[in-house]
Image (cartoon, rainbow, N blue to C red):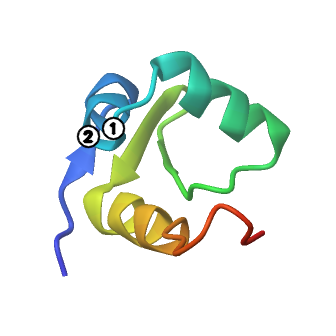
Amino acid sequence: MNSALLTTAEAARYIGMSKAFLERDRWAGARIPFVRVGSRAVRYRQADLEAYLGSRVRHSTSEQ
């Protein structure tokens, strides 16, 4: 398992989304797990990002 910690900007690039997407996700309930380091720093584990992407795979546009 890859335990690399990525900043919000790095994580956003990794999943092909914006930083704002990840910030909104944290505010709305965090579908994507994150790690709070200290009082302000937020990091994402690469393995969690990969798991999130894997959970979003669909085989048809009609799938929920």
Describe residue 11's horizontal placement relative to residue 2 as left or right: right
Describe residue 28's horizontal placement relative to residue 13 as left or right: right
Seen in the picture, residue 64 relative to 7 is either above or below; the reply is below
Q: Who is closer to the viewer here, 59 or 16?
A: 59
Describe residue 39's horizontal placement relative to residue 17 as left or right: right
- Residue drawn 46% across and 21% down? 18
Place residue 56 in its image quadrant: bottom right
Which residue, given by chain and number where applicable, does mark 2 sit on?
A: 14
Q: Dot 1: what SS? A: helix
Seen in the picture, residue 46 relative to 41 is either above or below; the reply is below
Looking at numbered disc 1 in the image, what kind of residue is underneath it? Ala
- Residue drawn 56% across and 58% down? 33
Q: Position of residue 20 (x, y in %)?
A: 57, 17
Q: Who is closer to the viewer here, 11 or 40?
A: 11
- Residue drawn 43% across and 62% down? 53
**Discs 2, 1 touching: Cβ within 8 Å:** yes
Q: Dot 2: what SS? A: helix
Q: Position of residue 49 (x, y in %)?
A: 39, 58
Pointer 2 local density, CA inside 10 Å: few below 14, some 14–19, many at least 20: some
Q: Position of residue 48 (x, y in %)?
A: 41, 65
Seen in the picture, residue 47 relative to 6 is either above or below; the reply is below
Q: Nearer the viewer, mark 2 or mark 1?
A: 2
Q: Residue furthest right?
A: 28
Q: Which image quadrant: the C terminus? A: bottom right
Which residue, given by chain and number where applicable, does mark 1 sit on?
A: 11
Q: Which image quadrant: the N terminus? A: bottom left
Describe residue 12's horizontal placement relative to residue 35 as left or right: left
- Residue drawn 26% across and 40% down? 14
Q: CA distance from mark 2 to mark 1?
A: 5 Å
Place residue 12 in its image quadrant: top left
Looking at numbered disc 2 in the image, what kind of residue is underneath it? Tyr
